[in-house]
Image (spheres, rainbow, N blue to C red):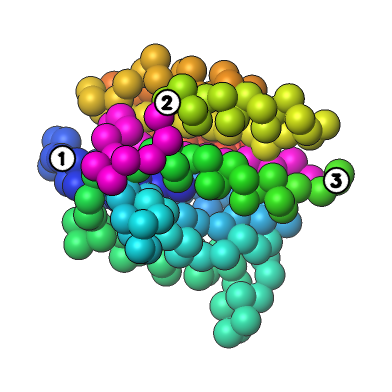
Amino acid sequence: MVDISGSMEAEIEGTTRIDLARSAVQAALAVIPDQTAIGLWYFSTALEGAADHAEQVPLRELGKDAGDGRSQREVLLEVTDELGLQTLTGDTGLHDSLWTAYEYMSDQQTPDTISSVLLLTDGINDDSTGGLTEDEVASLLEQGRQSSDSPVTVVLIGMGPDVDEAALERLAEAAGGESFVLRDALELPQVFVDIVARRAP
């Protein structure tokens, strides 16, 4: 899940936060094994009707044909090539998006898979359309973790000075996952690759 809220346009030493996010995702895609299934969602606020998220590429193994002769990896690289300033819109609907992604991946979970939600953001939940509070989403994530023998792993990655580190840590811990906050956003591409590589089989 990639944050496409307006604040991702912030400039950092000749680049922008969204450019760093694109570089990070594409660098990770270059090293993940073919058998790993990956999908891509963007999130901000009201992207599809009232929903704060929008699926860009459905979940599929990277080495599989996406249905048009291209592999899933190729599709993801082509879609993320377009990830830039023109993509950005709205505020940061983090809570609703995270919970929806958690529910979705829980539905995909099987006894022989390890399912994860990786969410990349540069800010805090400032959903101007309302939605779940921090207390509510933390409670839902904790219930999800406790009710499953193999709960979905949540990895929250925040970059830049505006991230609420305590909030990300609280949500990650509620789900039994991890959070990482990079105050220097230029560190993102390498750190993101390291995090994703640890999740891959």
Q: Magenta segment range? A: 113-133
Indicate whether residue 92 is drawn in magenta: no
Residue located 14% across and 40% down the image? 11
- Residue 119 visible in this rendered orientation of the protein: yes
Q: Callout 2, which amino acid?
A: Glu
Disc 1 to disc 3: CB gap under 8 Å? no
Asked if residue 77 is positioned above or below residue 170 in the image, the reply reads below
The tag earlier along the polypeptide, 1 or 2, is: 1
37 left or right, relative to 3: right
SS for tag 2? helix
The tag earlier along the polypeptide, 2 or 3, is: 3
Q: Callout 1, which amino acid?
A: Ala
Crowd band around label 2 with a 10 angstrom C-alpha radius: few (<14), some (14–19), many (20+): some
Residue located 24% across and 42% down the image? 128
Q: Could you tell me how far apart the alpha carbons at marks 1 and 3 are, in whole angstroms?
A: 41 Å
Crowd band around label 3 with a 10 angstrom C-alpha radius: few (<14), some (14–19), many (20+): few
Could you say where residue 88 lies in the image, as x and y percent from the top left? Answer: 23, 55
Task: Farthest residue to the top: give it.
Answer: 166
Magenta: main secondary structure equals loop
Q: Which residue is mark 2?
A: 134
Could you say where residue 131 lies in the image, as x and y percent from the top left? Answer: 38, 40
SS for tag 1? loop
Q: Which residue is mark 1?
A: 10
SS for tag 3? loop
Asked if residue 47 is positioned above or below residue 15 in the image, the reply reads below
The tag earlier along the polypeptide, 1 or 3, is: 1
- Residue 190 visible in this rendered orientation of the protein: no
Q: Callout 3, which amino acid?
A: Asp
> Between 58 and 189, which is closer to the camera in this rendering?
58
